[in-house]
Amino acid sequence: MKIANVVLSLACVISFSCTHAKIGYFWHITDFHYDPLYTPQGDTRRFCRRIDERSSSGHHQALGRFGDYSCDSSLELIESAAKYMRTRHSENVEFVLWTGDIIAAQYSGNEDDRYRAIRNMTELLSRTFSSHFVFPVLGHLDPSPSESLTNLWMHWLPLEALQTFKIGGYYTIEQSHSKLRIVALNTNLFGIREVNSVPAKAQWEWLDAVLDKAQANKEMVYIVGHAAPGTDLRPTYNALSVDANAKYLRMVRRHAKIIAGQFFGHLHADTFRVIYDKDQPVSWALLAPSVSPHHDPAGSSNPGLRLYKFDSDTGKVLDYTQYYLDLAAANRAGSGGAEWIAEYNLTQYYGLRDVSAESLHNLADKLRIGVPQETAMFNKYLRAYNVKQESTDNCDGACAHQHFCAITCLEHVAYRQCVEAAASALAASAQSSEVVTPMINMLSILVMILVILL
C-alpha cells in the first residue's frame, strides 16, 4: 500500500495533475493595419489602391484576394483571421489582447472614416468573440482617446477602466476569479512628443500606484502595450523616448516579482526581450508579429496570430502556439484558400524548459553568432522573426549581433555599446582572417608540392 502511495505521488509530480492548475488560453493579435481601400485591382505603386487609369503607364500584375506583401491588410485577410480564431480552443479562451495599429498607415480618410473603420474591426471581433472580453490598446496610428472611442469599447471594459481610458488611453482590469491583473498602457505617451505632457505624467503616476497596489495585494500582473521598450534594428520603430524607456525599465525591475508577462506588437516581427537587474534576467517581454504582411518602409512577413496557454489562477505563461497564413499560397488558391496553420510551439521549437526570464536569457545566448553549432538556432529564430517569409536581406554576422543586442540590451546606450563592441570584434576577426588565410593557402600549396615530390 505504501509503495502504491509513493507511485501515485510521483505520478502527480510528473503529470502536474495534483497542482490543480487551471489551464486557460488567450489570443494576442496586433497591427491589423486595415486598409478599407485595398482592392485586388489596385497597384502597389498606389498602396494597393485602384490606380487612376488616366495616369496609368502600362499593365500591372493583379494583386491577391487576401492581400499583398507590399501593402497593408485587406478586409478578407482580417476576416479570414477572425474565422480561424473562432475554431481554436473557443471554450477555454479567457480573453483577447488587441495591441493596436488598427488602421493602415497610408489610409488617408478623415476622422469619421477612420472611426468607421475601427468600428468595423470592433464589430468583427465582437462577433468573433461574442462571449469573451477583448482588451484593446492604442497604437501610434490609432486616434487619441475620446468619448467616441470609449463608447465603442465600453462593452468590453468596466467603469473604472473606462474612466482612465477616456482621459489617457490606459486602464487596468482585475480578473475576478484569480489573482491576475491586466495593465493596459498607452505607449504613445512614452514617445518623444508626449513624454512631458500632462497625460504622460498622469500615466506614470497611475502605473506606479497600480503596481504598488498589486504587489501589496499579492496579485500577478500582465503588462500590455503597443510598443515594447528597447531599441530595434530599424530606428523608425523605436517608439519610446530615451527617458521614458529608462523609467519604464526601472519600474519593471522594481516590480519584477509580480510581473508575470509583458506583451507588445508594433515591430511586425516575432521576437522577444529580456530585462536584467545587475546582470540577472528578471523579466521578459514577448513581441507578436502583425496580421498585416507589410513592414514600413520596406519589408514583409506572413500574417500571424498567437494563442497563449497559461495557468489562469496564477497568470504563469506556460507556452504559446504561433499561427500563420502563407499569403502567397492563399492568393494562389483563391476563394477559400486562406488556410491558417500552426507555425511552431514556443517551448518545443526552441527547446525551452519553461517560459521564464532565465530560459529566454539562455535562448538569447544561443543566438550569438560565432559558435558554429549555434548558427542553426539563429536561423530558426530568423525564420520565426519573418513568420516563414523568405527575406531578401542577407543577415550576416553584424546583423545577427544586432538581433542579440536588441533582445538583451534594452537601454539605448547599452544597445549602442553592444552593437559597437560586436562591430569591433567582427572587424578584428576579419583582419585576422586576412592574415591567416594567405598563410593557410601557402601551407596547402607546400603540402601539395611535398606530396608530388614524394
Image: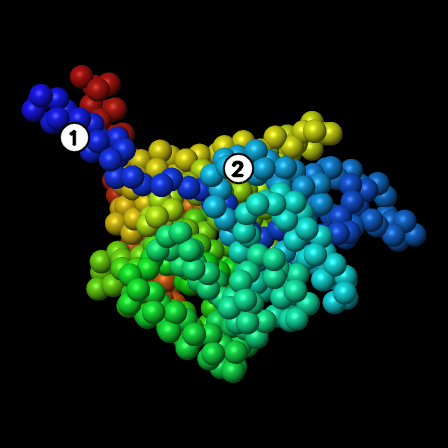
Secondary structure of the residue carrying numbered label 1: helix
Q: Which residue is drawn at 68% across and 57% down?
A: 118
Toward the viewer: 411 or 7? 7
In the rendered image, is residue 400 in sight? yes
Label at residue 9: 1
For the residues labelled 1 and 2, the Cα–Cα distance comes to: 33 Å
Residue 421 shows in this picture: no
Left or right, residue 209 beside residue 50: left
Q: Residues within 10 Å of mark 1 (few under 14, many from 20)?
A: few
Answer with left or right where residue 348 lies relative to residue 224: left
Question: From what the image shows, is residue 192 above or below residue 30?
Answer: below
Residue at the disc numbered 2: 90
User: For the point 61% across and 57% down, which residue is it?
Assistant: 155
Amino acid type assigned to the residue bearing label 2 in the image: Ser
Query: Is 17 displayed left or right of 402 in the figure?
Result: left
Who is closer to the viewer here, 335 or 163? 163
